[in-house]
Amino acid sequence: MNIVVIEDLTKIYNTGMKKGGITALDGVSLTIEQPEIFGLLGPNGAGKTTLFKTLLGITQVTSGYATIAGLPPDNPRSRKKVGYLPENHRFPGHLTGLGLLEFTGRLFGMSRRDIDAKTEMLLPLVGMDKWASTKISKYSKGMQQRIGLAQALMGDPEILFLDEPTDGVDPVGKTEIREVLRKIRDEGKSVILNSHLLSEVESAADRVAILSHGKIIRVGSVAELTSRESQYEVEADFGDKLFDIPEEVGKKISLFKDRLIVQLTDEKKINWIIDQMRMKKINIRSVKPIKITLEQSFIETVSGKKVDSK
Amino acid sequence: MRGITRDCISEMFSRKIFWVFAVITVLAVVVIILSGNISISDGSFQEAEVDIKDINEMIGNPIIRVFASFVSFLVILVVLATAGLIPNMFIRGRAEYFLSKPVSRTGLLLNKFFGIWFSYGVLVVVCGAIGYCAMYLVHGVAADNLIWVFVLNLVSLFIWLSVTSFAGIVFGSTTMAIVTAALIWFTQWLLQWHEYYKEVISSKAITGTIDVLYYIIPKTGELSDLTVQLALGRNVDNWLPLYGSLIFAIVLLGATLAIFNRKNY
């Protein structure tokens, strides 16, 4: 089931200075499934936050179409099952952590009993139960992120929009937040994660989209984005038993000591390589597809240049 | 109301401005206690051929004027104290919090507007009531007409809040909200003498424009005069300052909602 559907979404900001305005989103099409953790990556100014804001009705759409749970963003009911943790949020400083959750619950139209039950569950979940009665203005950045995550979960959302959720959070807190996200996904809900920490997205997300200059330039699973297409690393005792690779199979990229890296014309051609090695009685220690990090994949996609996998 | 009014009250109590109101009320009580309750008797003007009723009618009771001025001053203070509440609600990082909730923009803004009006209106009434009690206990002044001081000052607060809300949404700035309110106050003060300008300005286009402006701009200065007249128990023939200003406020609030509903955050 698709909880979010975006078709040809365009957002142009009229600045009054630049003729034609600034195009923040340029014909974005995307679907978010339920359940999944979806990572949204892109350089600064790529349009990630604008995409969040247009989906949540915070910014008006210039053209195109989007729905959340089947409802357009300008319908307040579309936000009934949405939780949002904005980047650089500034929650009302006069409220305590508990007060913020209660106020959020009331904005969601929740009953007193539901608010009490939810706050009792969420405060320990985000590790803020000891600080619930302290004013938000006194919180550290990490504490604000934790209470921000709790308020995003207050309305029992089907989909969670998180903009830099671990910004300012300590390593233990980051792990805890990652656990919370996985738990949410396991409960059958979806999360859209916008983060500059690519290792974090890599470890948490099921699928990833890379946004650049307002356009989606790549979408796929983390495994798809981090594997070098048809490149394999073979570790074996080659000795002097080297063999040539015909063009229709692929080509050697490098051979150093016992490590051979090959670029194949087709994934299945790895069987030809293995057959050849067995025929020549070469002892094979391992054969594995070459993986790159999400960060390398991201840089390659955005810059168009290959990054050394080492 | 989705808890926004309750939040406005909690926000009000958390601000230092609440204590400013307490201090000003104490000062006002002191001034009321020290003020004279002038009631002219026959003996005061035995030699003069003056009708005492006319003199009383002319000057009114100063203690009532002091009381009305005190409540009006509280309203000015509220306007200054609350000018930033709506623009602050929609600053970067906070607008996202409010606008991502399942509440329409119209509902959000109206709830905040009336939440501010209600919470600070109650504060004005409570501070005013303390002044009223002092006036009654010290001077024995307790006229039913004084209810007008509360009612019309709450109307005045509504008008000024519509101005600061409009500027707050359009400019997103507390300073601009206060400056806009000050400009409107100054304009309405100048326009009070719109009839006199006709005697010194020959151009019909200019005097016509002044007349149009007079009818458009809220007449809060004249509304204060009207409040005092009603508090003194006098008849009022011209209600234009009241309904003219109210129409302005309602139209401005509508325009604010229209702009807010189209604004990008």
Image (cartoon, grey):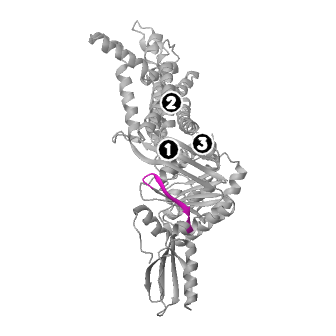
Residue A68 is at least partly visible in this image: yes
Marks 2/1: CA–CA distance = 22 Å
Q: Which residue is mark 1?
A: A59
Q: Nearer the viewer, residue B178 or B129?
A: B178
Furthest residue in direction top, as rendered = B49
Q: Is residue A22 left or right of residue A66?
A: left
Percent of width and height locating residue B155: 52, 27
Q: Which residue is mark 3?
A: A72
User: Which residue is at a point 60% across and 40% down the rendered structure image?
Assistant: A75
Marks 1/3: CA–CA distance = 13 Å
Looking at the rendered image, the quarter that the C terminus of chain A falls into is: bottom left
The first of marks 1 and 3 along the sequence is 1
- Point out the frontmost of discs 2 and 3: 3
Other-residue count near label 1 (Cα within 10 Å), few / some / many at <14 / 14–19 / ≥20? many
Which portion, as a residue range, is magenta?
Answer: A212-223
Q: Is residue A216 magenta?
A: yes
Marks 2/3: CA–CA distance = 27 Å
A250, above or below A35, in the image: below
User: Which residue is at a point 46% across and 17% down the rendered structure image?
Assistant: B40
Q: Which residue is mark 2?
A: B253
- Point out the frontmost of discs 1 and 3: 3
Q: Quadrant of residue B45?
A: top left
